[in-house]
Amino acid sequence: MGEAINRILKRDPSFDLSNAKEIINTRNRVIYSYDNVTSEFLWGLVIKHIPILKQDVERLLLEYEK
């Protein structure tokens, strides 16, 4: 997701996705600093942030279907 969002923002900086920069930063943390990523951090993403991301993606899909 982080890489895809990064590419989208490069083409369209006005792309409306909440926490886009945080998603990109998390991707970079996992890729480049994986030795500092704990299971608690990853579990927090799954529990707290993935449901919000799902809602945002569903909203975007509905907007683009119009």
Image (spheres, rainbow, N blue to C red):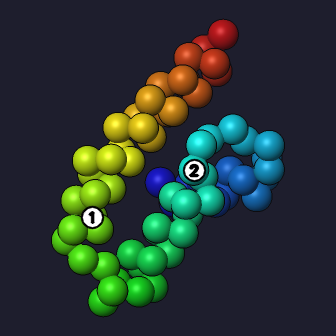
Residue beneath the point at 19% across and 71% down: 39
Q: Nearer the viewer, residue 4 or 22?
A: 22
Residue beneath the point at 24% across and 77% down: 38
| Amino acid at dot 1 | Leu
- Quadrant for residue 25, please give it: bottom right
Q: CA distance from mark 1 to mark 2?
A: 16 Å
For label 1, the SS is helix
21 horizontally vs 13: left or right = left
For label 2, the SS is loop
Residue beneath the point at 42% across and 38% down: 52
Question: What numbered label is drawn on residue 19?
Answer: 2
- In the rendered image, residue 17, in percent from the top left (x then y), is placed at 62, 41
| Amino acid at dot 2 | Asn
- In the rendered image, residue 58, in percent from the top left (x then y), is placed at 47, 25
Question: What numbered label is drawn on residue 42?
Answer: 1
- In the rendered image, residue 20, in percent from the top left (x then y), is placed at 60, 52
Quadrant including the C terminus:
top right
- Tell me: residue 57, above or below residue 10: above
- Which of marks 2 and 1 precedes in the sequence? 2
